[in-house]
Amino acid sequence: MAVDRDERLRYPVGARVAMIVRPEDIRLRMEERAAGENVLPGTLVGREFLGPFERYRVAIGGQVLTLSMVSGDPGRPAPDREEAVAVEIDRRRIHLLGGRA
């Protein structure tokens, strides 16, 4: 996962860190084989309509990411549960919390 230089400099190579990203900073991509920096393939496991936004849960490698998107985006079809999707995380929105190597 690529992160900004300032985040990388806070920890030595090999340090164990947790990646923190706000749900609204994760983008859902409908292309199963989407390419690019910080694009991960996954499977949609949940979708919840919450008025002005929708909350999605995507399984990726044994973990489930939660993301939020504005409801009713006319350029984005609603994905079906268990559909293969991808998520994209902007490197500038990733924060690291960690301990020691």
Image (cartoon, grey):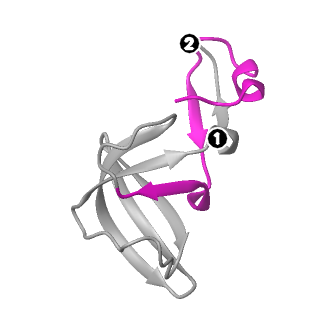
Q: Read off the residue under disc 1.
A: 94
Picture layout, residue 20 above or below residue 12: below
Helix, strand or loop under label 2 = loop
Q: Read off the residue under disc 2.
A: 14
Residue at figure coordinates x 69%, y 22% from the top left: 8
Residue at figure coordinates x 45%, y 58% from the top left: 28
What percent of the width, then of the height, locates residue 27? Answer: 51, 56
What percent of the width, then of the height, locates residue 52? Answer: 57, 84
Of the residues tagged 2 and 1, which is closer to the observer?
1
Picture layout, residue 82 above or below residue 61: below
The disc placed on residue 1 is none
Judge from the rendering whether residue 48 lies leftward or rightward of residue 18; answer left or right: left
What percent of the width, then of the height, locates residue 40? Answer: 40, 41
Q: Amino acid at mark 1?
A: Ile
Helix, strand or loop under label 1 = loop
What percent of the width, then of the height, locates residue 94? Answer: 64, 41
Residues at marks 2 and 1, CA–CA distance in whole angstroms: 18 Å
Judge from the rendering whether residue 36 lies leftward or rightward of residue 60; answer left or right: right
Residue at figure coordinates x 39%, y 62% from the top left: 57
Q: Nearer the viewer, residue 19 or 44?
A: 44
Q: Residue 24 lies in magenta, yes or no?
A: yes
User: Is label 2 in contact with label 1 (beta carbons under 8 Å)?
Assistant: no
Q: Residue 71 lies in magenta, yes or no?
A: no
Magenta range is 1-30
Q: Amino acid at mark 2?
A: Gly
Picture layout, residue 15 above or below residue 17: above
| Quadrant (top left, top right, bottom left, bottom right) of the C terminus | top right
